[in-house]
Amino acid sequence: MINAIAQNLKITRERIVAAEKRAARMPGSVELLAVSKKWSAEVIAEAAAAGQLAFGENRVQELVAKVPVLAPDLRWHLIGHLQKNKVKKVLPLVGDIHSIDSLSVLRAVDREAGKIGVRRRIFLQVNIGEDPAKHGFQAEELAENGVLEACDGLENLDLAGLMTIPPFSETAEGARRYFAALRELRDKVTARTGTALPGLSMGMSGDYEVAIEEGATVVRVGSSIFGQRPR
């Protein structure tokens, strides 16, 4: 198992480097986030032993169980939907939240971060494919309304950029237009507001190379590293 995970990480990193090169990106401009949802602390420790230090979890209850029993130098990201009643539990555990999908959650995270004296990095989740089954701001909310202006008043959060999960596609190429749309939205919003949004969290195991070609700065890769999730 250790050798399999280490080998999968090696292959994934090589593919990231190749995608950066194809897109004329700076080497090392893309962060690999290993999605450890449903994997045990022991399996995560194997990935850490192979040099992977950044992990993404979807569920707060899994973070609560795993973080205390794993090495303190691991960096944890919440990539799943965050409910306001879970904010207090998650903030002490993660450095980054990729799934801010409403102004009410944004404000709740900012308030709680102030209460416990921490600073956190956040991404605004955008429902770029207008999928009713997915969370996130609508593109026009960011392009035309005051969402970014509301972020100017944040005291305890750093706005890193935008995140999206595109609609399901049979092929990686099928997701390209959604990744391109998020990049274009980011550029449009930055031009309108002057707010820097350097980060684009997009791309998973089946399409992360295409996401990198379209500007991803963080890719969230699970099954390509760990294999199929246990039931």
Image (cartoon, rainbow, N blue to C red):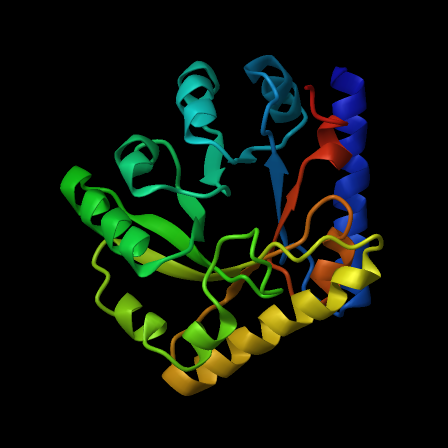
Q: Position of residue 128 (x, y in %)?
A: 58, 66
Question: In the current view of this chain or complex, which residue is farthest to the front?
Answer: 132
Which residue does the image show at 39% across and 22% down from the upper left?
64
Give the quadrant of residue 171.
bottom right
Is 218 in front, or is 25?
218
Give the quadrant of residue 3.
top right
- Residue 33 vs residue 162: left or right? right
Q: Position of residue 98 (x, y in %)?
A: 47, 50
Q: Is residue 164 above or below residue 191?
A: above
- Residue 53 vs residue 112: left or right? right
Which residue does the image show at 43% across and 18% down from the upper left?
65
Quarter holding the C terminus is top right
Is 133 in front, or is 167?
133
Is 18 in front, or is 108?
108
Give the quadrant of residue 29.
bottom right
Does residue 91 appear anywhere in the picture? Answer: no
Q: Is residue 18 above or below residue 225?
A: below
Which residue does the image show at 63% across and 54% down from the upper left?
30
Count of numbered circles in the view = 0
Does residue 207 appear anywhere in the picture? Answer: yes
Q: Position of residue 13 (x, y in %)?
A: 74, 43
Which residue does the image show at 21% across and 43% down from the upper left?
112
Quarter holding the N terminus is top right
Question: In the current view of this chain or complex, which residue is farthest to the left?
Answer: 115
